[in-house]
Image (cartoon, grey):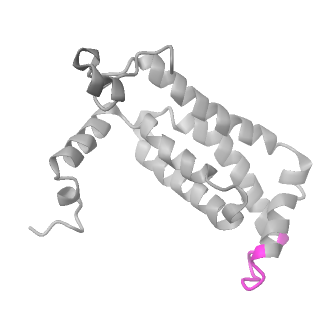
Amino acid sequence: MCFGHSGSIFSLDSLINKNARREQVGYWELFLLRFQICVVFFYAGLAKLNADWLIHAAPLYLNLVKHFSVLSYPLQEKWMAVVLSWGGMLSDLGLGILLFINRWHKLTFIWLCLFNGINIFLFGLGIQTFPYLMLSTYILFLPGPIVRESIARLLNGKFLKHVPILDKT
């Protein structure tokens, strides 16, 4: 990021120097950030391509037995650990690809939230803040108009007025 021109409307550079303000960030800068996130997902999927993860489901099975003794069925069953292991591997390999397809950003966001929510539920503090980090980087993959509209609503104080549950009209 130190080589790019990322100083835009909400950066510290634009607050200090009004002439440095830009309306848009270059696509190559956004692409590099997106690419780094996709590499993380891809290598996580590759790391799971082994017998311990896919056949024996050792990491998940041991964690399910250890932490979910009260909820014995189906979480402590071996088949559940195998299904979750395969789902985790496929999610890691698939999310990197789906994040680049703007047409399915709502489906991808739901899948990303479910996947990281399950990781938080199953592993808890074992993986600490990583799922939260992955969720927060999703804004990099949203189409520009959606981000601009959301920021404009937030700055105008109308962000919560457009949420259907909070709309009083």
Quarter of the figure with residue 58: bottom right
Residue at 42 percent across and 19 percent down: it is 27
Of residues 4 and 66, the one drawn nearer to the viewer in this rendering: 4
Name the residue at 64% across, 67% down: 121
Q: Position of residue 162 (x, y in %)?
A: 19, 56
Q: Nearer the viewer, residue 15 or 27?
A: 15
Q: Is residue 19 above or below residue 135?
A: above
Q: Quadrant of the rendered structure where residue 93 is?
A: top right
In the orientation shown, which residue stands out farthest toward the front? Answer: 16
Residue 39 spot, x, y in % from top left: 65, 31
Q: Which residues are magenta?
A: 67-78
Taking the spot 23% from the left edge, 48% from the top edge, the residue there is: 154
Residue 143 shown left or right of residue 31 in the figure = left
Number of callouts = 0
The overriding secondary structure of the stretch rendered in magenta is loop
> Is 11 on the left-hand or right-hand side of 98?
left
- Vertical position of residue 65 compared to residue 50: above or below: below
In the image, residue 61 above or below residue 89: below
Answer whether residue 57 is visible to the viewer in this image: no
